[in-house]
Image (cartoon, grey):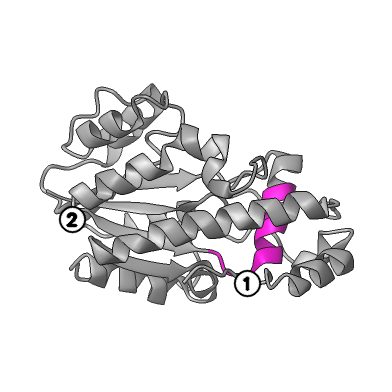
């Protein structure tokens, strides 16, 4: 059984992407297996699970894999997402959240395993991503559920800038895997525009023939119904500052 991992930062549409990829009859896609695992054991747990041994996973993940895993399938993978924290000093490399995530250890592990296929999902529109981060934290709604009507938030400018620098740093580090692993980058915005086309490209990357026909409706609806300006109270101020710093779109290639 061959392995793939969906990587990126949080709030980039990885849940919907994973569910879409998992529709193929040749693929089993797990959740974020190591999200709640001790930082010391994250890679160990992932390595074991990628062989089909799910004994070290949390019970919720075990239950999920019992339902969806099939030894006859060709591909087994999961999602490994990293925190784009605003708490760091000097450089995002020294961000405590990324050290606990073991970002650099994961990159070294991936490089030791060139057989692992990397699907890197990137959200390019900075303001839309920030809106998603802060509204999700305010409402505690992270997957599937629509945001309440009229919900708004004010995003601290310095905090937003720090988060974006971390996000760009993580995406920059993950993009280096194109040199050692089978690597596919997918834009969240492309996935949102046409879920079928983006998913087909992931299936082709894995060498899977489309085996499930999509309906005209997306599997998971977008949580927000408007633009970032509809949710961010200080949108104009934030927009001007990010434009001045060239941070309105992802900058890491």
* Picture coordinates of residue 139, whole percent (x, y): 74, 41
* Distance in Å between CA atoms under marks 2 and 1: 30 Å
* Picture coordinates of residue 90, whole percent (x, y): 63, 46
Q: Which sits earlier in the primary sequence, circle 2 or circle 1?
A: 2
Left or right of 70 in this view: 23:
right
Which residue appears at 35% of the width and 62% of the height? 176
Considering only vertical position in the picture, is 136 above or below 241? above
Which residue appears at 23% of the width and 36% of the height? 47
Which residue appears at 36% of the width and 31% of the height? 61
Q: Can residue 148 be seen in this view?
A: no
* Picture coordinates of residue 99, whole percent (x, y): 48, 35
* Picture coordinates of residue 136, whole percent (x, y): 69, 46
Left or right of 152 in this view: 74:
left
For the stretch drawn in magenta, the main secondary structure is helix
Which residue appears at 32% of the width and 72% of the height? 200
Q: Which of 20 and 249 is in front in this view?
A: 249
Which secondary structure, mark 1?
loop
Q: Which of 97 and 135 is in front in this view?
A: 97
Q: Residue 123 occupies which quadrant of the picture?
A: bottom right
Q: Mark 1 points at which residue?
A: 249
Q: Name the residue under label 2.
A: 114
């Amino acid at each position: 059984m061959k392995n793939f991992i969906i990587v990126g930062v949080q709030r980039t549409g990885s849940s919907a992407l994973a569910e879409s990829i998992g529709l193929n009859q040749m693929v089993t896609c797990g959740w974020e297996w190591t999200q709640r695992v001790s930082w010391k054991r994250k890679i160990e747990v992932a390595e074991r699970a990628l062989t089909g041994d799910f004994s070290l996973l949390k019970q919720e993940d075990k239950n999920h894999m019992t339902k969806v895993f099939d030894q006859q399938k060709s591909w087994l993978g999961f999602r490994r997402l990293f925190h784009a924290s605003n708490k760091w000093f000097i450089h995002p490399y020294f961000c405590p959240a990324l050290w606990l995530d073991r970002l650099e250890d994961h990159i070294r592990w991936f490089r030791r395993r060139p057989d692992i296929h990397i699907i890197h999902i990137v959200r390019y529109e900075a303001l839309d991503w920030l809106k998603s981060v802060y509204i999700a934290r305010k409402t505690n709604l992270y997957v599937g559920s629509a945001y309440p009507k009229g919900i708004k938030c004010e995003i601290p400018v310095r905090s937003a800038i720090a988060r974006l620098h971390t996000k760009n740093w993580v995406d920059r580090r993950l993009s280096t895997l194109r040199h050692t692993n089978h690597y596919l980058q997918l834009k969240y915005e492309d996935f949102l525009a046409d879920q079928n086309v983006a998913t087909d490209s992931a299936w082709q990357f894995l060498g899977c023939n489309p085996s499930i026909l999509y309906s005209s409706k997306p599997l998971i609806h977008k949580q927000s119904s408007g633009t970032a300006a509809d949710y961010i109270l200080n949108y104009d101020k934030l927009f001007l500052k990010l434009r001045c710093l060239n941070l309105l779109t992802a900058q890491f290639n």
